[in-house]
Amino acid sequence: MTDRPLWSYADIAAHIRVQVDTVRSYRKHGHLPEPDRVEGGKPYWYADTIRAWSARRPGNRGRRDPG
């Protein structure tokens, strides 16, 4: 078991400041990393996976991670 936080679509959307449907679209079109875990049919990603992806994703325009 790990203490690393898992993020849902909603957590990712809040982190990158977009709507949840936008994050779902990113996944559908292959722009989001594969989920780190799937529980009850729902995908989850480790926070560090998403932070790394967010830092290098197109359209990031050099934004910094707020925390």
Image (cartoon, grey):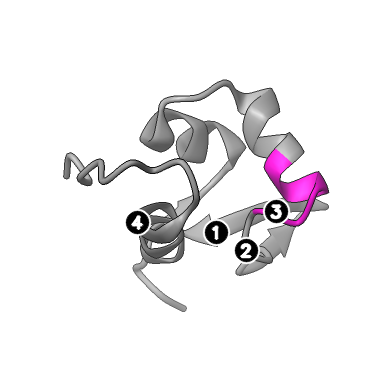
Q: Which residues are magenta?
A: 26-31
Between 26 and 15, the residue placed more toward the observer is: 26
Query: Which amino acid is tagged 4?
Result: Ala
Residue 63: mark in rendering:
none
Image location (x, y in percent) of residue 45? 54, 59
Marks 2 and 1: which is nearer the front?
Answer: 2
Quadrant position of residue 26:
top right
Query: Does 27 appear in magenta?
Result: yes
Give the spatial CA distance, label 3 vs label 1. Answer: 7 Å
Task: Identify the residue under disc 1.
Answer: 45
Give the spatial CA distance, label 1 vs label 4. Answer: 15 Å
In the rendered view, would you say 23 is above or below 62?
A: above
Direction from residue 47 to residue 37 in the image, left or right: right
Give the spatial CA distance, label 2 vs label 1. Answer: 8 Å
Query: Circle 4 — which element?
Result: helix
Query: Circle 1 — which element?
Result: strand
Image location (x, y in percent) of residue 40? 79, 52
Task: Identify the residue under disc 2.
Answer: 33
Task: Identify the residue under disc 3.
Answer: 43
